[in-house]
Image (cartoon, rainbow, N blue to C red):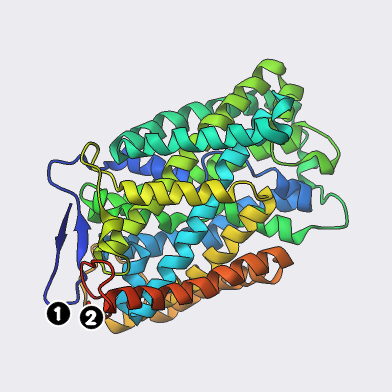
Amino acid sequence: MATTETSRASHELPVTTTDSTAKKLTLVPLIFLIYFEVAGGPFGEEPAVQAAGPLLAILGFLIFPFIWSVPEALITAELSTTFPGNGGFVIWAHRAFGAFVGSMMGSLKYLSGVINVASFPVLCVTYLEKLFPVLESGWPRNVCIFTSTVVLSFLNYTGLAIVGYAAVVLGLVSLSPFLVMSAIAIPKIQPHRWGSLGSKQKDWNLYFNTLFWNLNFWDNVSTLAGEVDNPQKTFPLALLVAVIFTCVAYLIPLLAVTGAVSVDQSRWETGFHAEAAEMIAGTWLKIWIEIGAVLSSIGLFEAQLSSSAYQLEGMAELGFLPKFFGVRSKWFNTPWVGILLSALMSLGLSYMNFTDIISSANFLYTLGMYLEFASFLWLRKKLPEMKRPYRVPMNIPGLVIMCLVPSAFLMLIIVFATKIVYLICGLMTVGSVGWYFLINYFRDKKIFEFNQDADNVN
């Protein structure tokens, strides 16, 4: 890995680039990595129906992409092509507001990322337990979570190019049973079921967190920008295709199952799609969807773990972390320290309640997104003449409106959070502030070696 540093007077930050001999991510693997950063299939969308009924669930997955996913993807496309380094959103916040905000952005997004990584082995086991009830609790469940985390972390260690092509295969295979189920369900669909509001009592916390968790993390792929072949052209197209692909992958199975199956609303918990498949076509399709869930969880885990690990590498290159965080494997040219640390943290968090996991990830991500929106707007104002290979086609007032709409939704995530989520995220936020000053202490006392002083990078 090499670091390129521009002059202090330049508008550029140092960016990370891989060695010329390393394999780079091309368009198709990047599309599927983005898909797995965000969705990975309709697994996990079921609680939206349980929380608010079929109509609001359908409207949520139809409307929410336009008020959240599209703006976030547009911002990611502009800033990733302008600052194509593995620091991703850390670079953006640092360039806009300085080292402290850059560090806070990095800490909040990293913590939300590893918490999110922790949810995927749990999601996988949740589907598997419907085939193997022994995994519902106790040591078999814990051993399964531990083993899957270790094995999948090693796969991540073998290289991003391998992970990217694996994501293509995993994406196509994991979606195939939903296409079959949706086709078989067509004659059984009764459209009036789509208009049901369900029970009068709505669980808004579960509803909004389900939508947010299933349709966020578009900017996570920015931490892989240094690994992408020709990112200025590849990123915008990959994000466009991934947004369309993701929305369709959620809506088609949701419309099929809500229209074809009539069950008590309380049964729409995580994993219900497999039960619905059995009602629609038989046990064979249920098993196929269970297998798809496992494969999807693998893809989600690999994509998210990659983003977290490469983010740490990018922060080390920028001087936000000690230099050893950016060390790469001699065999696979992957940031093994970042992979190991992220895997260990996610393993420790994976034994939390699933709802608390996704709610905590959403809460921390929300705080980071406020910083991201502010950084995006300020960079447009601060550096209006800076070369932007892709530029969101709006002026400042239009961009403010574009950011205000999703910002209002982010406030709902904060308002509807539970006490345990407030506690977890409050402690982590305070810890992020303390971490910034601790790192400065390490730098001042020369306890660890740093690539550069983040406060002085321009």
* Residue sitting nearer the eye, 189 or 52: 52
Residue 129's disc is none
Describe residue 260's horizontal placement relative to residue 143 as left or right.
right
Q: Quadrant of the C terminus?
A: bottom left
Describe residue 330's horizontal placement relative to residue 169 as left or right.
left
Q: SS of the residue at dot 1? A: loop
Residue 79, how many percent across, how many down? 32, 65
Q: Establish if 358 lies above or below 123.
A: below
Q: Which residue is mark 1?
A: 8
Give me the residue at 41% from left, 55% from top.
220
Describe residue 264's horizontal placement relative to residue 320 as left or right.
right
Q: Residues within 10 Å of mark 1 (few under 14, many from 20)?
A: few
Which residue type does callout 1 highlight?
Answer: Arg
Q: Establish if 321 lies above or below 371.
A: above
Q: Which residue is mark 2?
A: 456
Residue 113, how many percent across, how many down? 48, 55
Of tags 2 and 1, which is closer to the observer? 2
Give me the residue at 74% from left, 42% from top.
269
Q: SS of the residue at dot 2? A: helix
Label 1 near label 2: C-beta < 8 Å? yes
Q: Along the polypeptide, which appears first: circle 2 or circle 1?
A: 1
Give me the residue at 54% from left, 56% from top.
65
Residue 85, how many percent across, how many down? 26, 60
Which residue type does callout 2 highlight?
Answer: Asn
